[in-house]
Amino acid sequence: ITEHAFPMSMHRHNGGIYLGDSNGKIHIINEKDDFNLVESHQTEHNKGITGIQSTTGAIITASLDHTARFVSPTTPPHHFACLRGAFGEICA
């Protein structure tokens, strides 16, 4: 996470900690390896990620940009679906 962003959401799954930040990036931390950063990826969100959930088949994020997005849990993640909120920001 850079000095220009801060964590806004967090989820634990299979030994990893998934963070969504204020710049719309996903960061994955290995909790079994001294909490070292494994990887970071820019998403298609253009505002902060307010919710993040990881499953076996997808990483799901919600954002202040009025969208919920679904990406593959691969390196790099591939975007495969987007839901747009009609009434404002999406929070988890």
Image (cartoon, rainbow, N blue to C red):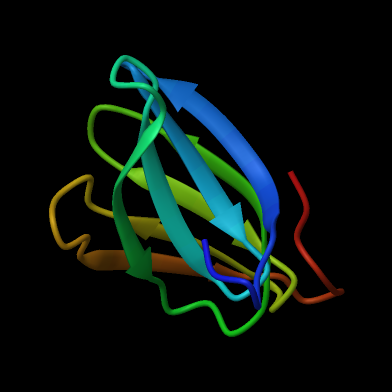
Is 43 placed left or right of 62 in the picture? left
Question: Where residue 15 sits in the image (x, y, percent)?
Answer: 33, 16
Find residue 75 and report its horizontal and vertical position in percent: 13, 55
Up-down: is 57 above or below 90?
Answer: above
- Find the residue positioned furthest to the bottom: 46
**Left or right: where does residue 82 sit relative to residue 57?**
right
Q: Nearer the viewer, residue 73 or 16?
A: 16
Image quadrant where residue 47 sits: bottom right
Q: Is residue 10 above or below residue 7?
A: above
Q: Residue at x 67, y 45 (%)?
A: 9
Left or right of residue 70, residue 20 in this image: right
Position above or below: 51 against 56:
below
Q: Residue at x 24, y 27 (%)?
A: 56
Q: Quadrant of the C terminus?
A: top right
Rendering quarter of residue 82:
bottom left
Q: Residue at x 55, y 30 (%)?
A: 11
**Residue at point 41% right, 72% down?**
43
Query: Residue 90: x and y, percent?
Result: 75, 60
Q: What number of labels is visible?
A: 0
